[in-house]
Image: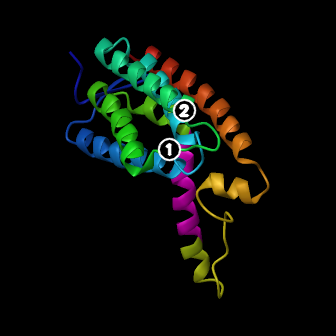
Amino acid sequence: MCRKMLVPLPPGLMYLGRYYQLLTSFSFVSVGHGIKLADALDGLAGGTAALAFTGMSIAVLPICSDLAIFGASMAGSCVGFLLHNRYKASVFMGNTGSLALGGALAAMAACSGMFFPLFISSGIFVLEASSVIIQILHLNVTKGLQEAGWRFLRVPPFHYHLQLRGFREPNIVLGAYLISSVLALLGGYVGLISA
């Protein structure tokens, strides 16, 4: 049976009460939106989602083994999607697939209380969503100081900024895979020690 209303953190368990529902809602919206933003490059959303599911599967294993099996099967389905849609993809995931992956990741965290490992394992998605938020806030703040707002990034989200700086699409995706694999292992480890 999976625990509810308790969030395991490295020092110990923390009871959130009714704020648990706010954290759950925030997780569903933010992770789903982050995966939707990362879906613009071929293989970026699918590969990093597979790694995030792997990290979450490791994190929830001591709490709920059924969720770990679910996460592993979702990671396998993302890898199967990647085998047919590498660079120069012929089929796109779209909003339906990316929001479903975000919802599945957030559901794993909501059922187990593993929100901290979720945000660590989904670090690429957090970066993508944060880059858009930072760009909008920065434009609004600097618009009052100057005639036209000064841009923090050339174009948000962050992977488009890297493309405009001259990085090729496969190199951006490979770098995201490397960073996401480290973050998935770190998120799984944090989940194991806090369970």
Q: Residue at point 65% right, 88% down?
A: 147
- Element class at badge 1: loop
Graded by Cα atoms within 10 Å as few (under 14), some (14 to 19) or many (20 or more), the crowding at tag 2 reads few
Q: Main secondary structure of the magenta part?
A: helix
Discs 2, 1 touching: Cβ within 8 Å: yes
Q: Is residue 177 left or right of residue 59?
A: right
Q: Is residue 112 left or right of residue 172?
A: left
Residue bearing mark 1:
91
**In-front residue for pair 28/12:** 28
| Image x and y of residue 12, in percent | 38, 21
Question: Which region of the structure is painted magenta?
Answer: 124-138
Taking the image as drawn, is residue 63 in sight?
yes
Label annotation for residue 84:
2
Q: Earlier in the sequence, mark 2 or mark 1?
A: 2
Q: Is residue 126 magenta?
A: yes
Q: Residue at point 71% right, 53% down?
A: 162
**In-front residue for pair 77/154:** 77
